Image: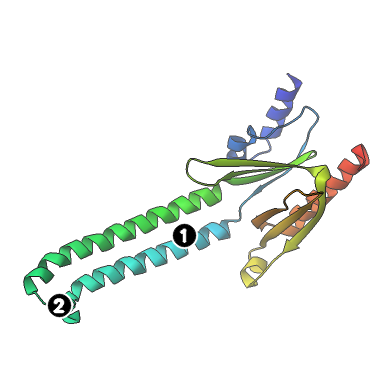
């Protein structure tokens, strides 16, 4: 009862996307939400621009090839050229539409990635494909070190970066890319880890 009330109170602080995914995370009665991290919008813009440009260029190239089949002398039979042209144009259009569709799918997967920092753990909900979801949880007490990196002018201009969380023992390190305000997020993780140590010890 108290745990449900705590979850309900925490959900009021979450974004609409965070509310959708928060119930996948184990959350204790006395646990507190520290931070919700969503992927930076610049990464989504990058995916959509690159995907649209590549899809358009490939489609235009294929359609252009169809228009100049006779000039390129790849096919010498005029009758065959006239019958192939509509087919090649259709292939170009289908490839372009598929490319744009795949771009939107990759963008959707990128957007459906949420990280929750709580007083007890770091949890990530990640869609690896349209039908596959992965939930990773790391005890905040197992955090050994947090490294923040910003590479390139865009990361500094738009204030995003990569967080690498080094873990204790043989556990795999956690790497989060396109994190908004990475230094603030890193400080929040370190601060929460130190508070956890004060409460529970090593």
Mark 1 or mark 2: name the one nearer the start of the chain.
Answer: 1
Residue at the disc numbered 2 = 70
Q: Quadrant of the C terminus?
A: top right
Q: Residue at x 41, y 62 (%)?
A: 52
Q: How has the structure been colored for display? A: rainbow
Q: Nearer the viewer, residue 170 or 168?
A: 170
Give the percent coordinates (x, y) of residue 80: 10, 69
Q: Nearer the viewer, residue 141 or 186?
A: 141
Residue situated furthest left in the rendering? 79
Could you say whether the residue bearing mark 1 is in a helix, strand or loop?
helix
Residue situated furthest top in the rendering? 1
Could you say whether the residue bearing mark 2 is in a helix, strand or loop?
helix
Q: Residue at x 22, y 64 (%)?
A: 89
The label on residue 48 is: 1
> Is the residue marked by circle 2 packed among few (<14), some (14-19), or many (20+) residues within 10 Å?
some
Q: Is residue 55 left or right of residue 48?
A: left
The mark lying in front, picked from 1 and 2, is: 2
Q: Is residue 102 left or right of residue 30?
A: left
């Amino acid at each position: 009862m108290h745990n449900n009330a705590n979850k309900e109170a925490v959900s009021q602080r979450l974004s609409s996307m965070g509310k959708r995914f928060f119930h996948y995370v184990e959350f204790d009665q006395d646990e507190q939400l520290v931070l919700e991290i969503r992927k930076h919008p610049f990464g989504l813009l990058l995916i959509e621009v690159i995907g649209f440009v590549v899809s358009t260029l490939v489609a235009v190239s294929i359609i252009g090839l169809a228009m100049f089949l006779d000039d390129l002398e790849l096919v010498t039979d005029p009758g065959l050229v006239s019958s192939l042209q509509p087919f090649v144009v259709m292939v170009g259009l289908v490839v372009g539409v598929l490319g744009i569709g795949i771009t939107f799918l990759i963008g959707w997967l990128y957007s459906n990635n949420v990280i929750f920092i709580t007083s007890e753990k770091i949890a990530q909900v990640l869609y690896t494909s349209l039908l596959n979801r992965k939930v990773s949880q790391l005890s905040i007490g197992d955090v050994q070190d947090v490294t923040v990196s910003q590479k390139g002018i865009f990361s500094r201009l738009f204030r995003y970066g990569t967080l690498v969380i080094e873990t204790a023992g043989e556990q795999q390190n956690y790497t989060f890319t396109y994190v908004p305000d990475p230094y603030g997020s890193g400080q929040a993780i370190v601060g929460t880890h130190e508070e956890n140590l004060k409460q529970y010890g090593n």
